[in-house]
Amino acid sequence: EAARAAYAAKRPLSAALHERALEVLGGGNTRTVIAYGPFPTAMTRGEECRLWDLDGHEYLDLCGEYTAGLFGHSEPRIHAALHDVLRRGINFASVGPGEEKLARLLCGRIPSLERVRFTNSGTEANLMALTAARAFTGRPKIMAFRGGYHGGVLTFPFAGSSLATLPLPFVLADYNDIASATAVAQEHAADLAAIIVEPMQGSGGCIPGTTEFLAALRALANETGALLIFDEVMTSRHSAGGMQARLGITPDMTTLGKYIAGGMSFGAFGGREDIMAQFGGKLAHAGTFNNNVLSMNAGVVAMGEIFTAEVAEALYRRGEALRARLNGLAAAAGAPLSFTGIGSMVSVHFRTPAPNRPYAQGQGEEQLRELFFFDMLEAGIYLARRGMVALSLPVGEAELDRFAVAVAAFVDNRAEQL
Ligand code: PLP
């Protein structure tokens, strides 16, 4: 409560904006993920990995737009590409060379992508991939995992919650639990069109899928005739070829999103040629902005020139080092704190050992996560409200030092609450 009050007192302009927004926006804003109490911080300007809010505070940005902000706020090559597009004009209702180039770059990098198509978001990419799988197999059901997140209308409840609001017929199993996945796959074997899974659950708390678990899903898909879909909307940043290249497991289809268009709206789905050949034949996939020239051309520069295999590897290593450092710091202090994730994505959990299942409900961690978020804001560090960090390329050693110092201070100052 004290942390909330201190937060609110310093941000009257963000508070006033929120009041006005409630009058015209359902729920006060259009992104559930930033609808935290008492009101979201309104940001007005960004440069490299720094952000400024409406009330004039400066932050080190470690949220990285939930992984879409990989290039920071002012990458000059992306800005140049966008200016170039604007000079030539937008909204042509046509095809263009950017779309073909970006598709070629992605198919050249991600092992499972023989063909790809573009959407405006990861949500749409997943809806299209699932539609393609249902059409290809002629079967209705999809297996997903509790705690998983595949988009705005594809958010998966924990045990006891309702499946009634989901747009497709899903059956749910437990993440990182081979016995649970096997039982569900066997029960629905004849009806199963696809198994969709995040190689690391992002929204679920940066919980890596074990190699054994993901390999078991590959085998279950083969046995049942369902298609295996990797949702790599977040995890594709973990190597040039995505998490699948790191794991050595190739799904039938892959979905992408977030950073790939240099920070412009983006989604993509693709996979085996025979599955993707349905488009242009029996399956339609229209969309006014699917190949919008801003996203396509920014994406060509982002993936072709900036986020090379070497850069991806260096970012991965920087994240691994950060997580080891934070876990070391918590262990040395004897604090019940752990940091999960893969490479440049890190989530804080208020228990040890680090969990290998998604955020458990009702474990009393929620208040501590909120406290962590507000204390970091107070230290001038902006991260995702749920305690997730997604490093962007402009984040350097000095910034990581600053974060580690802030985490150490949190562990010290909040010893009683922990
Ligand atoms: N899939 C995963 C794994 C995600 O993390 C997200 C977004 O956070 C999505 C899909 C949805 O992407 P978008 O927000 O672009 O619709």
Image (cartoon, rainbow, N blue to C red):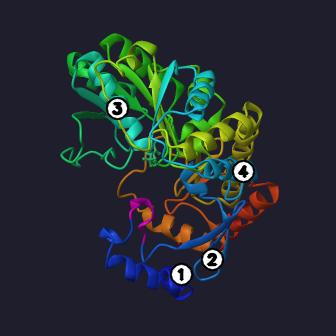
- Is residue 34 rendered magenta in the image? yes
How far is disc 2 from disc 1 in space, using C-alphas?
Answer: 8 Å
Residue annotated with mark 3: 285
Residue annotated with mark 4: 80
Q: Is residue 310 left or right of residue 131?
A: right
Please report the bounds of the magenta region as a residue range. Answer: 30-36
What's under tag 1, amino acid-wise? Tyr
Which circle's residue, 4 or 3, is located before the other in the chain?
A: 4
Up the image or down, 231 lies above or below 190; here it is below
Kindly tell me whether mark 2's CB lies below 8 Å from ligand 1: no
How far is disc 2 from disc 4 in space, using C-alphas?
Answer: 35 Å
How far is disc 1 from disc 3 in space, using C-alphas?
Answer: 45 Å
Mark 2 surroundings: few (<14), some (14-19) or many (≥20) residues within 10 A? some
Is residue 377 in sight in this rendering?
A: yes
- Is residue 245 rendered magenta in the image? no
Quarter of the picture for ligand 1?
Answer: top left
Callout in the foreground (3, 2): 3
Residue located at (21% from left, 44% from top): 163
Asked which quadrant contains residue 366, the reply is: bottom left
Instruction: Identify the disc placed on residue 63.
Output: none
Which circle's residue, 2 or 4, is located before the other in the chain?
A: 4
What's under tag 4, amino acid-wise? Ala
| Outermost left residue | 164
Does the residue at mark 2 contact the one at mark 1 (Cβ under 8 Å)? yes
What's under tag 3, amino acid-wise? His
Callout in the foreground (1, 4): 4
Instruction: Identify the disc placed on residue 7.
Output: 1
Which circle's residue, 1 or 3, is located before the other in the chain?
A: 1
Which circle's residue, 1 or 4, is located before the other in the chain?
A: 1
Callout in the foreground (1, 3): 3
Kindly tell me whether mark 1's CB lies below 8 Å from ligand 1: no
Residue annotated with mark 2: 378
